[in-house]
Image (tube, grey):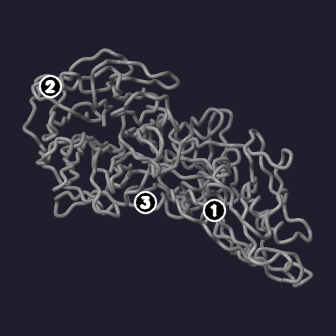
């Protein structure tokens, strides 16, 4: 099992500790503008290893100091926002919901007084405007959504208790608003895990348990998110985007036992999780599946060395519901990506070849698809490495064949009638169910196709084609995640190719399969992407460039955010890339120099000088 599977929890985001006011950042330590041009509230200029502390309002603080202090508390160590509420009126403190929305701006929010400063002396109410350029939002599900637009919101203050009272905020902003650097310091990307709910068995003989699907969310923590908060997010259920294709094994209403604020493994790496009464009567098999969700969500977050065992407790906080160790968790939720034995690519003779993982011994694959009788320009190998699929050299035909001696290459499963070779079939992709996907780029008849176990007749997949302002989007590349419920597409629209992630929904109409890809969303909104590959539970490796930038290779999150390591050592003219969802395996790329490979922490190394279209199984 790879790093993502053994510790399927955390996807680190760049963290910054920030400095203000001589080393400790206190509310009210920076003055706020009260008139004239708006100015940014730079809550935290970048300096390492300094935490930010919030402070309550001072007596007789002026409106600008109240606004200043309130915004500062949103960037400090105020996890339950109790200090922030001290800047609000009693009524506003009760109704304000900081968890409803987090708005991330390029810089700290800029403020502008809506009335002349002189009026503060006699006024009993006063208004400010907050503004900035929005980068993203985090919703009540903790889900990240890129959002580039102008942010404007008004804040109203009143003198609570009349003219002799204290200034307080009566109309606070919706949720929390802060700058991008503070967001990166305060929030961490975490993978919650849920079971795929619409998965058919991957094999015909023995049904396999459904895989766990990564659901990336952002949880607040300074410097790390508390494990209890992560479990609360898990128990609250999947994000609304993923919810239609996954399910949780926790009974409805299950929560942590009342009063549980901290969770921590003991010195034997055993973690006890007390639940409320909703879980008291669950059966052992269901309990173990619940424990597996917790195990994979928390393992890589638990410092310093992870978790070896999860025990769920009844609502009395003492009696055991079930115990699950690492081996049990892996048995209940097998990795759909598997542990590949080989890496594959198309050699100079246009035939499919393979290398033992992380070795440089190249050999043809067995069976008709590796015989060289049919020249190929791209290929894919099933995750169990028993089947191969290849697109002919001219892009017109898709062939499928067994990867064993004597296996014949059947007639083409899919054909494209596009006039130009560049507008015919994309490279194929196998999902964790053992099904095969490919797209036809024909401008006259663009299609996304699914083949049951690679052997069935092609089924046209529904998807929203109206992706751009100037007409339909056209699929240029397809990669299905190992879990089978998420798909990555390169979509050309409005003259630009972007990366989108869709949700795969399987239905049946009188026994006839109906497949749909729904709610496509941008995963690298600021990049034009030319190549991509899944590289973890919710991470992708992409090749592309931002506007006016140079082409680069970097990791992106499926939700559109950036993980810790954002760019990789450069390569010359990268045409395609391959990564395994097992993050311990090397990256492979087709560059101007040939087929190259890079293990973690190493430089790119040449494997062969001539070759193209590298892939891992999938």
Q: Which residue is mark 2?
A: 367
Apparent side of residue 279 relative to residue 361 in the rendered image (left or right):
right
Q: Which residue is mark 1?
A: 132
Residue in the image at 74% along x and 45% along y? 18
Mark 2–mark 1 distance (CA, rounded to whole Å): 60 Å
Considering only order in the chain, which callout, 1 or 2, is on the residue closer to the N terminus? Answer: 1
Q: For the residues labelled 3 and 2, say whether their Cβ atoms are less than 8 Å apart.
A: no
Residue in the image at 74% along x and 58% along y? 41
Instruction: Report the quarter where the C terminus lies.
Output: top left
Instruction: Report the quarter where the N terminus lies.
Output: top left
State the image coordinates of residue 227 (x, y, percent, origin top left): 64, 47
Q: Secondary structure at mark 2?
A: loop
Badge 2 local density, few (<14 within 10 Å), some, or many (20+)?
A: some
Residue in the image at 33% along x and 20% along y? 356
Q: Which residue is mark 3?
A: 243
Mark 3–mark 2 distance (CA, rounded to whole Å): 41 Å
Report the front residue among 514 and 156: 156
Q: For the residues labelled 2 and 1, say whether their Cβ atoms are less than 8 Å apart.
A: no
Considering only order in the chain, which callout, 2 or 3, is on the residue closer to the N terminus? Answer: 3
State the image coordinates of residue 72 (x, y, percent, origin top left): 76, 58
């Amino acid at each position: 099992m790879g790093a993502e599977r053994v510790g399927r929890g955390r996807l680190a985001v760049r963290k910054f500790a920030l400095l203000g006011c001589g080393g400790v950042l206190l509310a009210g330590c920076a003055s706020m503008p009260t008139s004239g041009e708006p100015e940014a509230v730079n809550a935290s200029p970048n300096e390492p290893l300094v935490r930010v502390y919030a402070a309550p309002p001072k007596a007789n603080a002026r409106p600008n100091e109240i606004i200043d202090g309130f915004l500062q508390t949103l960037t400090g160590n105020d996890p339950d926002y109790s200090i922030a509420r001290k800047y609000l009126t009693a009524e506003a403190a009760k109704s304000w919901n900081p968890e409803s929305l987090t708005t991330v701006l390029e810089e700290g929010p800029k403020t502008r007084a809506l009335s002349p400063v002189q009026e503060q002396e006699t006024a009993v109410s006063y208004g400010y405007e907050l503004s900035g350029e929005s980068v993203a939002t985090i919703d009540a599900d903790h889900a990240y959504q890129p959002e580039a637009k102008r942010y404007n919101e008004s804040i109203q203050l009143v003198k609570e208790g009349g003219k002799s009272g204290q200034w307080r905020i009566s109309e606070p902003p919706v949720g929390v608003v802060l700058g991008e650097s503070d967001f990166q310091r305060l929030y961490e990307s975490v993978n919650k895990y849920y079971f795929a709910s619409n998965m058919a068995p991957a094999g015909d003989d023995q049904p396999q348990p459904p895989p766990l699907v990564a659901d990336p969310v952002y949880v607040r923590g300074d410097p790390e998110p508390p494990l209890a908060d992560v479990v609360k997010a898990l128990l609250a259920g999947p994000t609304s985007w993923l919810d239609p294709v996954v399910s949780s094994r926790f009974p409805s209403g299950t929560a942590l036992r009342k009063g549980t604020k901290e969770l921590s493994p003991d010195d034997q790496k055993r973690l006890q999780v007390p639940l409320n009464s909703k879980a008291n009567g669950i059966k052992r098999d269901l309990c173990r599946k619940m424990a597996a969700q917790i195990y994979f969500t928390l393992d890589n977050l638990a410092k310093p060395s992870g978790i070896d065992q999860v025990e769920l407790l009844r609502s009395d906080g003492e009696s055991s519901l079930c115990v699950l160790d690492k081996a049990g968790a892996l048995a209940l939720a097998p990795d759909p990506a598997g542990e590949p034995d080989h890496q594959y690519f198309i050699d100079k003779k246009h035939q499919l070849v393979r290398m033992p993982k992380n070795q440089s011994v190249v050999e043809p694959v067995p069976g008709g698809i590796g015989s060289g009788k049919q020249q190929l320009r791209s290929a894919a190998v099933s995750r169990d490495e028993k089947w191969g699929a290849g697109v002919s050299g001219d892009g017109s035909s898709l062939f499928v064949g067994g990867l064993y001696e004597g296996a014949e290459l059947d007639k083409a499963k899919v054909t494209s009638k596009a006039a130009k070779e560049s507008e015919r079939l994309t490279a194929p992709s196998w999902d964790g169910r053992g099904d095969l996907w490919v797209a036809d780029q024909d401008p006259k008849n663009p299609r996304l196709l699914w083949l049951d176990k690679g052997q069935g007749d092609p089924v046209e997949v529904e998807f929203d084609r109206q992706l751009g302002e100037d007409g339909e989007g056209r699929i240029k590349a397809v990669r299905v995640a190992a879990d089978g419920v998420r798909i990555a597409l390169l979509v050309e629209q409005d003259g630009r190719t972007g990366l989108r992630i869709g949700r795969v929904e399987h239905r049946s109409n009188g026994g006839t399969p109906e497949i749909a890809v729904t709610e496509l969303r941008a995963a690298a909104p600021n990049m034009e992407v030319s190549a991509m590959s899944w590289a973890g539970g919710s991470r992708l490796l992409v090749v592309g460039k931002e506007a006016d930038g140079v082409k680069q290779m970097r990791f992106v999150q499926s939700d559109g955010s950036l993980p810790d390591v954002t760019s990789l050592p450069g390569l010359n003219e990268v045409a395609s890339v391959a990564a395994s969802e097992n993050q311990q395996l090397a990256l492979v790329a087709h560059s101007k120099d040939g087929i190259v490979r890079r293990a973690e922490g190493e430089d790119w190394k040449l494997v062969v000088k001539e070759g193209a279209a590298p892939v891992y199984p999938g």
